[in-house]
Amino acid sequence: MADKFIVERAWAHDLKSPYGADTWYLKGIIDVNKDLAVDSSLQVTQVEGSNKVSNRFDVGVIPKFDIYGPVRGRVRLALGEKWSSTGNYKTYAIEPGIFGNLGAGFSGSLAYRYRNAFESGHLDRTTTLRTGVDYAITPKDTVGVRLDTMRGDSKQDIWNLNYVRSF
């Protein structure tokens, strides 16, 4: 159990257009106890070609539970807001998943996120399969890679690299 600060860089390949997107994430996670965490996330994305920028901010609660041995489950419930050139709107997300130690300093995660806007007409309804592997460089420093396969109103394959500092 440890509080965490995460810096993440993502590159999206948009399967609906010839352009991709570059994204930076800043995240904070506070473990209330071993079975509950709260988090917040800021995301800044720039679309290639158009140079349009969008921003997201969300806060979440993450109940966690034992499944079997080193494998634990979690369900992230989040509320947020997106700001872009096409407008501002509120969103919600539900993300169940599993995570656990793989041995030799490695850990893995698998999750499925459903995200949508509260109001219709914003083209932000997506489902995302997330698969990640992390490596502990030190007991407090981790680097990782994750593939997000997003489908729905957006159709993207997104590679994420991250650094996590635990406190």
Image (cartoon, rainbow, N blue to C red):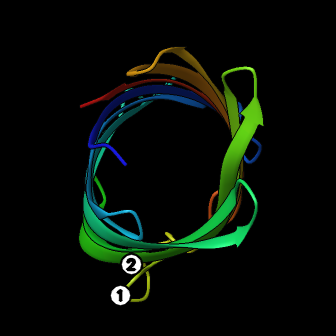
Q: Amino acid at mark 2?
A: Tyr
Horizontal side, residue 109 vs residue 75: left or right: right
Is 145 drawn above or below residue 138 in the view shown? below
To which residue does mark 2 refer?
Answer: 92
Q: As rendered, which of 44 and 119 lies closer to the eye?
A: 44
Between marks 2 and 1, how big is the CA–CA gap?
Answer: 7 Å
Is 29 drawn above or below residue 81 in the view shown? above
Q: Position of residue 72 (x, y in %)?
A: 64, 63
Horizontal side, residue 114 vs residue 167: left or right: right
Q: As rendered, which of 109 and 57 lies closer to the eye?
A: 109
Q: Position of residue 90 (x, y in %)?
A: 26, 76
Residue 48 visible in the current orientation: yes
Quarter of the C terminus within the rendering: top left
Is 128 drawn above or below residue 9 in the view shown? below
**Residue farthest along the top direction in this orientation:** 137
Q: As rendered, which of 15 and 55 lies closer to the eye?
A: 55
Name which quarter of the figure residue 91 lies in: bottom left
Picture residue at 49% right of the left edge, 21% below the top = 142
To which residue does mark 1 refer?
Answer: 118
Determine the secondary structure under disc 1: loop
Mark 2 and mark 1 in contact? Answer it, CB < 8 Å. Answer: yes
